[in-house]
Amino acid sequence: MENLSLTDRIKRSTKAFVLFHTYSVTKESVTRAIEEQKSMDLDVCVDERGKPYIGHSQEFYRISSEKQQECLSLWEAVDLIAKASIPIIIDCKHHDAWQVVEEVIRKIGSHRCLLHAYANELKFTYNFYDYDYPSEWSAIIKLAQLKKQFPSLTTTASCKFLPNDFLVSDKYQDDLFKIREILKTNHVDTVCLNVPDCTITNKTLDFFLDEGILQHINVDGVDVSKLLRPYVGETNILESASISQILGY
């Protein structure tokens, strides 16, 4: 099991696995996640001087007016996580942070890492439900390159600005097939469509699973009891996150 990727472990289990998502990466939150054998989440970014830190881009905070969270330094958090065995979300928050991301993967171990990025090729114009942050977008080949370098890495590409009825209306079938083909071509393991999670069904899970791709679902406040296929869940509540030992970590 040691060299199996996170997605391979989830598919082998045939059940969903829920990862912990957070913006507050403190010594206390990391230590608790490790002690409870859950998972952790690191938003990896760089400032204008190329210095790495945990958080969104400065562009994001400027445009959105969101307050930047107080977090550990990136390498303090990585050192704590590297000594443990839990899986980790690595979220690349800036197109200039890829060298840093690569070093984080190397230190933690690729079989424990789920690497997420917004892919240029999956940027749509249907529904501008959020601001656009140009620095958060990268070419999907960045994920493919790291997957080739680290075969046991799990890669995740995010779409943005899809319509709310994307999965319930037949008029978007061409886009749905286009997304799956882009993911398949670039050997991407999981996809986050960023559509209402309540619209995800076993049918849509099967559509991507036919090509070995898992979907992401934010499980907070969503009834997932009828979903019978494996998927990658995310929660902002540590108690709701899966125990990593069930996947052999």
Image (cartoon, helix red, strand yellow):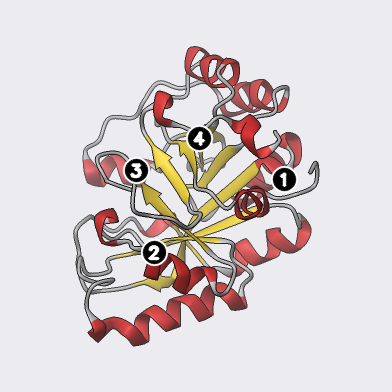
Mark 3 vs mark 2: in front:
2
Please name the residue that numbered disc 3 is placed on: 219
| Spatial separation of the CA atoms under disc 4 and disc 2 | 27 Å
Precedes in sequence: disc 3 or disc 2: 2
User: Taking 26 as reference, is 191 above or below it?
Assistant: below
Q: Nearer the viewer, residue 180 or 248?
A: 248
Question: Callout 4, which amino acid?
Answer: Asp
Secondary structure state at the residue bearing disc 3: loop
The quadrant holding residue 207 is bottom left
Q: Is residue 188 left or right of residue 191?
A: right
Precedes in sequence: disc 4 or disc 3: 4
The quadrant holding residue 70 is top left
Mark 4 vs mark 3: in front:
3
Secondary structure state at the residue bearing disc 2: helix
Secondary structure state at the residue bearing disc 1: helix
Q: Nearer the viewer, residue 38 or 105?
A: 38
Precedes in sequence: disc 4 or disc 2: 4
| Spatial separation of the CA atoms under disc 4 and disc 3 | 16 Å
Contact (CB < 8 A) between labels 1 and 2?
Answer: no
Which residue is at a point 20% across and 70% down the rendered structure image?
165
Question: Callout 2, which amino acid?
Answer: Asn
Callout 1: 10 Å neighbours few (<14), some, many (20+)?
many
User: Taking 139 as reference, is 64 above or below it?
Assistant: above
Mark 4 vs mark 2: in front:
2
Callout 2: 10 Å neighbours few (<14), some, many (20+)?
few
Please name the residue that numbered disc 4 is placed on: 41
| Spatial separation of the CA atoms under disc 1 and disc 2 | 29 Å
Contact (CB < 8 A) between labels 4 and 2?
Answer: no
Please name the residue that numbered disc 2 is placed on: 202
Which residue is at a point 69% across and 58% down the rendered structure image?
146
Callout 4: 10 Å neighbours few (<14), some, many (20+)?
many
